[in-house]
Image (cartoon, grey):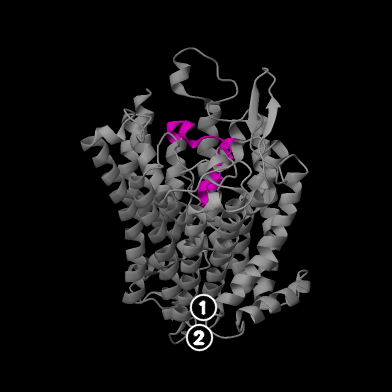
Amino acid sequence: MNNEISGVILLFLLTVILAYPLGKYIANVFSGKKTLTGFLNPVERFIFRVSGINPAEPMNWKQFLKAMLTINLLWLVYGFFLLIFQDKLPMNPDGNPGQTPDLAFNTAISFLVNCNLQHYSGESGLTYFTQLFVVTFLQFVSAGTGIAVLIGLFNGLKEKTTNNLGNFWNYLVKSITRILLPLSVIVALLLAFNGTPAGFGGKDSIVTLQGDSVQVSRGPAAGMIAIKQLGTNGGGWFGVNSAHPLENPNYFTNAVETISILLIPIALVFALGFYINRKKLARVIFGVMTFLFVIFCSINIYYEMKGNPAIDKLGVAQTAGSMEGKEVRFGAAATALWSVATTSTSNGSVNGMHDSLTPISGGVVILDMMVNALYGGVGVGLLNYFIFIIIAVFISGLMVGRTPEFMGHKVEAREIKIAALVTLLSAFLIKGFTALAAYMVAHHPEIAWQVKPGAWLNNPSYHGFSEMLYEYTSANANNGSGFEGLGDNNPFWNITTGIVLILGRYLPIIAPIAIMGLLANKKFIPESPGTLRTDSGTFGMMTLAVIIIITALSYLPALALGPLAEYFSLY
């Protein structure tokens, strides 16, 4: 048990140690300084020349967002039609069929928005062609989009007064060529040398230790798994994701993938400090995020290693902890760490079944996605945290009787309204659509219960409610994990979660960039003795309080109906 906990601590410390120099490297890439990947300059110039792009062309916040939304719409159409007609395309050795329009709609949106909510099984739902040219492609460009937008925000923070957030196309290309591709090659090689498939052969027949003959899916999985973790995408090549012995063969690969999930999101926090030359601000943000992350990890590790109280009543010893839905090769502590890491970063991959987590642990991972700002997805985590900063600045200004300011710019009614609307929107999407699903369960049980094909819920009562709450929380947070007792591959779930996916991705991106564009264009106000210091521990505590209060007020009633009620029912 002590060894398991020591392993968790060492994993996190190693991640932070690696993230710090990576953050400096990222800042250097986008500052135009010389880096080890400078040899890629000719490749990038070729891409810009072929695309007709001037990477030095300035963009205001509206032009920046227009470029981002336009290319994302094109990728959506591209992915949708390839998924529908994948059975007619090459590289399909297992003969997998094309997806239905509603499933293709959900899948294309899901991977476009960096969520990877999968309403299909990876082995049978996609072909090698769509795994590579739709899923893996979108995993690169969606992560690149998040980083590019964040650098636009950095530019607004860096300058005293500016109308230029930089060039979206330049940042998108460099995010992929200089950051995502090199790191993915390293992780893919580590996985491939430890047993993860990297070939193009179809299913293989093997005989198990019990003497059963089974068909095992394979394919070029290592590269896709590398970017799914590094880009906080999370979609599994195989249906059970990183709990599959070929996606995640041993404890070493589990450590590599866990570090990969957290590495770039943490590095981007440090990159903020290097890029705008405000290292103390970055440390405060990192401290707030890490404080909640450690608390969530501690709770989950405790409850998963303690075991299930319902089994305790039977007098059965649980020396290894609650091992339902977990892999023995990882153990309860490593699975608990992964559950928090994957929901803190909007990654969504799993190395154990979240549906089998004990009630409090299940509630923690749902709460983690509701906050959606602890490191967060690549790029967008800091964008979400920026919204909390703006609200904290506003409240702090009211408390001291002074016009709120953030880094030399007045925060006025327009910016606060945008921040408040985004905050309220998340709660509305999660609770509103969960209420709709609960209504369907209550008034249309013929489609919601396991009484005919296409039914929804495998579990009644509190846990069934948690399954539905988790699905919409995951979609809104662009996470992608799920309580898999939910039967979600049907038009209702495919369409409603698709709507939540789009709104949950783009409005929280548009809002911070709009706020930053408005702030950066205002007259710069030099610091004075009365200026609110946003890089102090006091302001960090204020931001933490805002996160806790807003999240509690928005979501505690829903959590009480699901995970908390289930927990107390066990006693």
Does the rendering let one see residue 257?
yes
**Is the residue 431 above or below the residue 49 in the image?**
above
Quadrant including the C terminus: top left
Q: Regarding mark 2 in the picture, which secondary structure is present there?
A: loop
- Residue plotted at (67% across, 40% down): 202
Q: Residue furthest left?
A: 443
Location of mark 2 (residue): 162
- The stretch of residues the image draws in magenta is 335-360
* Other-residue count near label 1 (Cα within 10 Å), few / some / many at <14 / 14–19 / ≥20: many
- Where residue 109 sits, quadrant-wise, is bottom left
- Which residue type does callout 2 highlight? Thr
- In the rendered image, which quarter is residue 351 located in? top right
Verify whether residue 56 appears in magenta. Answer: no
Kind of residue at disc 1: Gly
What is the CA distance from the residue labelled 1 to the residue labelled 2? 7 Å
Q: Position of residue 53 (x, y in %)?
A: 60, 82
Residues 357 and 47: in front is 47
Q: Position of residue 204 (x, y in %)?
A: 69, 34
Q: Identify the residue under disc 1.
A: 156
